[in-house]
Image (spheres, rainbow, N blue to C red):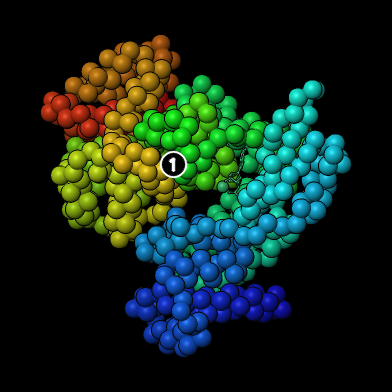
Amino acid sequence: MIAGAIHILRLGRAGFVFAREGVLGLVDPQALPPPARLGLRLARFIERRGTGTRSDRLTAALTRLGPTYVKLGQFLSTRPDVVGATIARDLESLQDKVPPFDQKLAEQIVVETLGMPIAEAYASFGPPIAAASIAQVHKATVRDGEVLRDVAVKILRPHVADRFRADLSDYYFAARLAEKLVPDSRRLKPIGIVDTLARSMAIELDLRLEAAAASEMAERTRDDPGFRVPSVDWNRTGRNVLTTEWIDGLKLGDRAGLDAAGIDPRALGQIVIQSFLRHALRDGFFHADMHQGNLFADRAGNLVAVDFGIMGRIGPKERRFLAEILLGFITKHYRRVAEVHFEAGYVPAHHSVDEFAQAIRAIGEPIHSRTADQISMAKLLSLLFEVTAIFDMKTRTELILLQKTMVVVEGVARSLDPRLDIWTSSEPVVREWITRNLGPVGRIEEVGAGAKLVGRIVGEAPALLGRAAMLSERIDDLTKDGFVLAPESLKGIGEAEARRNRSSTVALWIIAALLAANLIWG
Ligand SMILES: Nc1ncnc2c1ncn2[C@@H]1O[C@H](COP(=O)(O)OP(=O)(O)O)[C@@H](O)[C@H]1O
Ligand SMILES: [Mg+2]
């Protein structure tokens, strides 16, 4: 009872800040039941004068409310199905710049976490160079025999974990209340949303887990051309402290610096796209916060990523789904795109496949009148998710995270090279991937000529695929799972090859690779 009252008080304060900063003015009254509309009108009386743009207002309110709310905002920017497409977009630019905390305090956290005096851990320990709501970063040096090595030391903000715990319990309270009182809200699974937020927070609040993500990424990308991640110094890493190799490079947003260093922005743009695709396609494990602030170019022109707090993982089923829909769009088999959604169980069966296909055609057709440098894979997916929401598609968070990251990645790459053609940039990655995984490239090209993909791969690459019996079981499983390779999709590959349309051929390669990956490891 008392706990409930505390939650209500704390949430009431948050409501007040939202009202004060003008956030309630962003809510569409039509979307609310009549009594709530009245409440909304009343609440707007306390609005501060001179509130800024939509996203300024949101940023002001969330920053005032603290790091959990900032995180909630960043998280909801990936959930247009919950907050609507406009607010999701407003939240995208949400940055959490806050003043750094005290140097003494930072040093104290280092001492407590590492269990040794600061002078023993580091030869020198500088002031903070960056501060955000969860952590701040200091530059320090480490003695390695005779030499001094520069390192970056990320330190968790004091008490941030307690604060998260308290705020999250408010969110759980609100979510439970919503599910109880507003039956309509159950479709959005508010409790599930808070669960997901809590899980991702738990990862961000333990820097050993960020260290592990950096280390996993380093291992997977060891031989990747043009891309690397800083190495982790595990001896100087704990729950509240993460020490990594210092990256002496230029931020990707520093165009003048890049030019002065003689780094080719176009080549760098390609590396950005190619690295992202390679990680998503090959590893199903990608950096999900690839904005310019987390990306450097080193002296040799390599892309170096930092900040592994948010990572994406996509399983074989989602990769396959993605492949089928992209394939359907490119070959204009809109009905097939629609069917895939039903087969995967993403769209409830009571909807009409034909109507869904019609909506998908509305997204797909305009793409075919554009030139390659105007086509955005991210935009395509975002439109698709908007349509699928109308058809009650269950949200696939990992796919939305992939799509959101794609928006950022395309943005960074196009800021380096405005004429970037996303399909041709992707080609070398896909070619390499196919060669490594499927042997001679020719096999897939034969598939491209319209042959049956499953038959070809099973029949012609036995060494690679292992025992045929096991494989056919796998394929049975796939089919049970609701995924069937549609003959018309395969025909589509052949047709596009025949038209010799470069962009779509490349795109089809990507898709063939995705499909093949999932057939083998699905
Ligand atoms: N290894 C590193 N070398 C050089 N600078 C770094 C390194 N790691 C982080 N930084 C700098 O510190 C900033 C904040 O670190 P980051 O890990 O991105 O923290 P946050 O999670 O708060 O965004 C980065 O944008 C970058 O400028
Ligand atoms: Mg960062």
Position of residue 249 relative to residue 365, above or below, is: above
User: Circle 1 sits in a helix, a strand or a loop, which is it?
Assistant: helix
Left or right placement of residue 342 versus residue 47 in this view? left
**Where residue 422 appears, x then y in whole percent?**
31, 36
Residue holding disc 1: 255
**Where residue 42 appears, x then y in whole percent?**
46, 88
Q: Quadrant of residue 326?
A: top left
**Where residue 341 appears, x then y in whole percent?**
31, 47
Which residue is depicted at the point 36% across and 36% down?
320
Q: Residue furthest left?
A: 499
Q: Nearer the viewer, residue 130 or 210?
A: 130
Q: Please identify the quadrant where the C terminus is shown.
A: top left
Left or right placement of residue 292 versus residue 375 in this view? right
Q: Amino acid at mark 1?
A: Arg
Q: Quadrant of residue 492?
A: top left
Position of residue 362 relative to residue 377, above or below, is: below
**Taking the image as drawn, is residue 522 in sight?**
no
Which residue is depicted at the point 28% across and 30% down?
424
Position of residue 329 relative to residue 188, above or below, is: above
Count of marks overlaid on the render: 1
**Where residue 345 appears, x then y in whole percent?**
35, 48
